[in-house]
Amino acid sequence: MDSMDTPRAAVDVEAKIAQIKVHMPNTYASIQEKARHIGGQAYELVRRGLRGERNCFYAIEGGRVVGTTFDASHPEISLVALSMVDLGVDSCVTIWPVWTRPWEINRGTH
């Protein structure tokens, strides 16, 4: 990766965050709620997911998709599939990693 890629990635993340705020109100509310529970690490998980890192953040709302999918070994994937079938494509599904303690987020422990 050269230095030209870094600013572009930052702009893309900011554009995706703006998209969430404007067009995905339930997803945005979910992010804010998660931040109330685990602090600023929630926003870092969102940014990591928006940059393409798996197992951090993934959301679907109103036909829009943001973030990066989780590995198939994560149980959240089944939840997404079931929710989309049961609730339809206009539903909102926000996927977060499953951690019992916020400090595990930085270590990536489940």
Image: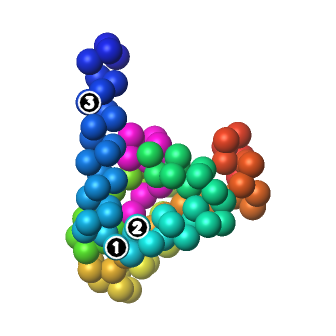
Q: In this view, does 103 lie above or below 99?
A: above
Q: Which residue is drawn at 31% across and 69% down?
A: 24
Q: Can residue 81 be seen in this view?
A: no
Q: Does residue 105 appear left or right of residue 91 in this picture?
A: right
Image x and y of residue 1, in percent: 34, 16
Tell which of 92 and 71 is nearer to you: 92
Residue type (three-letter) at the residue carrying disc 1? Pro
Q: Is residue 54 magenta?
A: yes
Q: Which residue is drawn at 40% across and 67% down?
A: 28
For the residues bearing labels 2 and 3, Cβ distance under 8 angstroms: no
Task: List the residue tagged with mark 1.
Answer: 25
Q: How crowded is mark 2: few (under 14 residues within 10 Å), some or many (20 or more)?
A: some
* Disc marking residue 85: none
Q: Residue at x 32, y 63 (%)?
A: 21
* Residues drawn in magenta: 48-59
Name the secondary structure under disc 3. helix
Task: List the residue tagged with mark 3.
Answer: 8
For the residues bearing labels 1 and 2, Cβ distance under 8 angstroms: yes
Residue type (three-letter) at the residue carrying disc 3? Arg
Name the secondary structure under disc 1. helix
Between disc 1 and disc 3, whose residue precedes?
3
Instruction: Report how far apart the C-alphas of labels 2 and 3 lie in the structure.
Output: 23 Å
Q: Residues within 10 Å of mark 1 (few under 14, many from 20)?
A: some
Task: List the residue tagged with mark 2.
Answer: 28
Q: Does the magenta stretch include residue 3?
A: no
Instruction: Report how far apart the C-alphas of labels 1 and 2 lie in the structure.
Output: 5 Å
For the residues bearing labels 1 and 3, Cβ distance under 8 angstroms: no
Image x and y of residue 87, in percent: 35, 85
Image x and y of residue 74, in percent: 57, 57
Q: Does residue 67 appear left or right of residue 56 in this picture?
A: left
